[in-house]
Amino acid sequence: MYMEVDEICVKLDANASISYGSHMRENAPSPNPQAIKAWARLMRVSRQLTEKAEEALKEAGLPPLSWYDVLHELAEAGEGGLRPFQLTERTLFAQYNVSRLLARLEIDGLVEKLKVADDGRGQTIRITGQGRDMRRRMWAVYGRSIAGLVGAKLPAEDLDVLARLLGRLRDPPAD
């Protein structure tokens, strides 16, 4: 059951009055109805697609999507690996979440931590052979999810337009 754009505007306007007071509302720019509708759909669709991909991985007895994201970034980095702060920059996880996830991946033998020669406390994280294998197994399921949830629902031209539009919303913008 989806709210109409006008209902969302009224709720947002009421919440702004409650949260910020009327003096803040007068000075703050209000989103137009199209922006509100796009935002609501983007948030809802993002959550739904992620949940469905997570469900497919779980049904296949595989780890969560966050594992894939980290393993993917490490595989893309090559033999040099990445420092933990670089993983935080390349994924959407907070630093403390990356630290916990890396500890778990290391326990499972999917990554290894290497000391950085010129930085006594620094570490480089590198994917292991087991990690590459896990990434391949996860991709088999995750890739099918992407194909079914996105690729099968929109023609290639629409996917190109969608990717371009979403790229413009990134910070910094992407092609």
Image (tube, grey):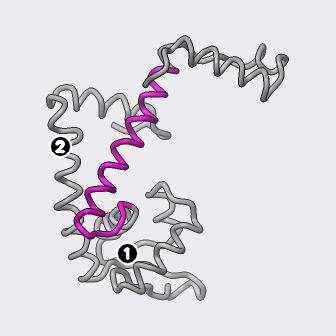
| Mark nearer the N terminus (1 vs 2) | 1
* In the depicted structure, whether residue 113 falls above or below residue 163: below
Q: Which residues are magenta?
A: 36-65
Residue at screen point 50% across, 40% down: 171
Quadrant housing residue 26: top right
Where does the C terminus fall, quadrant-wise?
top left
The answer to whether residue 10 is left or right of residue 152 is right
Q: Foreground: 16 or 23?
A: 16
Q: Left or right of 8: which side holds 63?
A: left
Residue at 21% x, 26% y: name it.
Answer: 158
What kind of element bears circle 1? loop
Q: Give the number of the mark in front: 1 or 2.
A: 2
Foreground pick, 156 / 59: 59
The picture quadrant where one finds residue 108 is bottom left
49 falls in the magenta region: yes
Q: Residues within 10 Å of mark 1 (few under 14, many from 20)?
A: many
Q: Vertically, is 110 above or below 16?
A: below
Outermost residue toward the front in this view: 1
Label 2 neighbour load within 10 Å: few <14, some 14-19, many 20+: few
In the depicted structure, whether residue 119 falls above or below residue 59 = below
Q: Quadrant of residue 18?
A: top right
* Magenta region includes residue 85: no
Q: Which quadrant is the N terminus positioned in?
A: top left
- At 64% from the left and 20% from the top, the residue drawn is 11
Q: Amino acid at mark 1?
A: Gly
Q: Which residue is mark 2?
A: 148
Question: Which residue is at a point 33% across and 56% down the rendered structure image?
Answer: 54
Position of 173 relative to 84 (above/below): above
Helix, strand or loop at disc 2? helix
The x and y percentages for residue 153 are: 18, 32
Q: Which mark is residue 81?
A: 1
CA distance for labels 1 and 2: 32 Å
